[in-house]
Image (cartoon, rainbow, N blue to C red):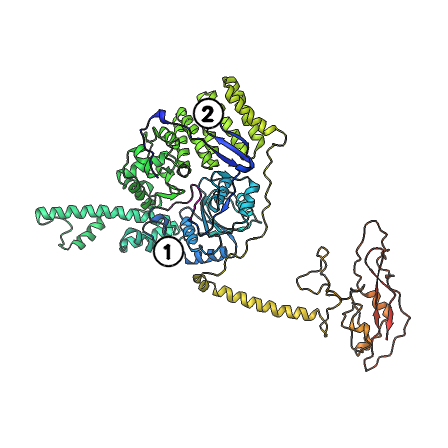
Amino acid sequence: MAQPSGEFRQEAVRTRGGELVSGGLLVGVGAPDGSEARPCPPEWRPRPRRIERSEPARGPVGGVGRAVGPLAMGAGPADLPLLDREADIAELLGLLAEGRSIRLVGQAGSGRSALLSAVAEAAADLAPGGVVQLCGHRRTAADLLQDLFAATHHAPGYRPDPAQLAAHLAEVGAVVVIDAAELSGAELDRLLALAPGCSFLVSVAPDSPPLAADSRMRDHLVAGLSRSACLALTARLAGRALDVAEKAWAVDLWFESEGLPLRFVQAAALLRQRDVAVDALVAAEDDRMDVFGAVDGPVRDPDPAIREDALRRTVPLPSVAETASPAVRLAEGLSEPAQAVLRLTVALGGECPTAPHLPALIDVGQGEAALAELADAGLTVSIGGHHRLTAGAFDLLAPHWPARGCVDGAAQHFAWWVGHSSVTLEQIAAEAEVVIGVLLADRAAGRHDAVIRLARAAAPALALALRWGAWERVLQLGQEAARRAGSASDQAWFHHEAGVHAICEQQPSRAVAELETALTLRATAGEPRGVASARRMLDLLRADGRQLPAAAPVAPSRAPVIRKIAARVPARLKSSRRRRVAVVTTAVLTIGALGTAVAMSLTGPDGHPAKDSHSGRLDQGGGAQDPPFPQPSGSPAPGPAGQASGSPSATSGSPEPSASGSASHSPSASPSKKPSSSPGATESQAPQQPQPTVPGQPQPPVPPPGQPSQTHQPGPPTSSPKPTSSPTPSPTVTATATPTATGGPSPSASTPTP
């Protein structure tokens, strides 16, 4: 990031201006009387173009930056491989390949960001759209959706409304990786609903609320490392093998910390500081030997290695309590430039500016080296294009590292910087959290004029950079400072800008309230041009046909609708999923055999469907709400008892038993000693199929319970035949269906067939 050239003077501060398109509105930002929005002509509206994977990689504004130091464990200069995470990576890749969305949860310092980076690198070929990496630190859900749109479409200066955004993101099929997200479960479900073709892998804070029961996401716990992995990590970061005492110390730390990787990154930094102290003792010992030729003391051995080991034992290892909260001890062992940068970071609430700003703020020329030293010590991590303190470090350092005036003049510097023509919008978006940190520091110090000056300069720049969550936060801080300073003109300006922001966010009620407040304040202050600008915005809201539509709610999908994005599973997943494949294969074979048995039970000996099998499909339950399965052309319609009129038993006088599966079987079809019932009784006992009804037409009477149905006329009475040893043909009833007034088939009188 280049530092703007030119002399730094207060009169050089100017407001950045420009235009952007928000939905169907053309918004002019940075005007002297405040921003204005008006309907955008159709020919001026952007036409977003999808970014193909063959094009150069384009990250979102203020997206994920490369981490610095070993804390990233795989993304830093040392390129350290992840330890003890092979199973987690294989499982997450398998879930992403199936179209699942996962939320990484775990304790602070458990290595969620490192695991996220490793999975993102391995999942490059899973989806047709590749992998999109976003930064969720201090981003709202709307900001993340805009970042996803900016990473997959080429449309600079365009922020679509929710309906347009849903249409554009519906065509995206990618693996979306979001680090340090600060969203609730409902906001995550909205992300999934607006991008149904994407799989999401999101890292959230430890105190995030649990997911809803019907959420499409599932949680994956990132636990601590094993004891051997923690020992190996400590030795790698320390740069040497651990001795017996250090191994025992590291094992005690592993039991206390539950294997959190961040604790061992900081433990390795403590060992390096101890090595520096040992080296100083060895150098002093060598100097005395050179001068006096011999040493009077506990170490008299001429072997340098033995003398070093003996001197190392004189420097005690940190206690478990000190390693549990090592931030203060680590900070005391830093170099002076690194301590100055750390003090500035604590003063800004944990947000550290990038290296080009450090010479102007704290007179540190080697900013990159200082930032790398802080990251190596496990005190800061790079995220979103800048550095911030790791979890828990701010609370430990704030009481011991006061500001000491290191933020004096920071607001003036950034007010000049955001308006300079050589600074890009991407650079401003990357420093948005730092600018907010400067505003908060000046507010705590009571410098309200500095807050107003920086807020008025940064708000238009953040609006043009499409960081609207930070834009809203800056307007709120500036409005509060103007109220405390008693400046009615500045209050009116911030209220006007807040109204334009609400118009762009499709919040008409809030926009009207802000603009009416700005109108009243500007009329009191005697600003006719400001009054006219506020009235134009109110006319835009209240004009017929121009009322801003409310954002249409997006119903979250209950099931994943992403297609199978994995054309082939990576080779490293095959070995870890062989057991799962074997289990699935066994289940498929079992279901196939069971399905064959069920199908045979639903069909007769000649292969025709049974009378009570309904539609003849295993996946149809035959419920009242299920649509009827269409009959093939030429097939007969079912009779009143579910028997087809064209069944074999109805067309031939074969003595074989009927395959229609009637409710009561004829005793003459099998050698039995029970008397057979009449054909009429057989038909009356058959289950009745409900008839479709047509509103407004008379319905046939329904017989009361306990009385025989009058649908069929009983045949002639027959006497009970004597039991015989040979089977005789059973009388079969043929039912023909005729249309009735209700639209359903009505059976005619049944006639026995010999």
Q: Amino acid at mark 2?
A: Pro
Residue neighbourhood size for the residue with mark 2, other residues' Cα within 10 Å, grouped as few (<14), some (14–19), many (≥20): few
Q: Compared to 611, does 431 lie above or below?
A: above
Q: Earlier in the sequence, mark 1 or mark 2?
A: 2
Element under disc 2: loop
Residue 398 visible in rendering: no
Q: Amino acid at mark 1?
A: Leu
> Who's the residue at 44% across and 31% down the image?
17
Report whether 88 appears left or right of 313.
right
Element under disc 1: loop
Report whether 685 appears left or right of 188.
right
Which image quarter: residue 714?
Answer: bottom right
Q: Compared to 721, does 266 lie above or below?
A: above
Residue 439 visible in rendering: yes
Q: Which mark is residue 83?
A: 1
Q: What residue does disc 2 label?
A: 32
Which image quarter: residue 506?
Answer: top right
Which image quarter: residue 9?
Answer: top left
Prevailing secondary structure of the magenta residues: loop
> Who's the residue at 57% across and 42% down the image?
163
> Who's the residue at 46% across and 45% down the image?
151
Q: Mark 1 or 2, which is nearer the eye?
A: 2
Rounded to the nearest whole Å, what is the CA distance between mark 1 and mark 2?
Answer: 56 Å
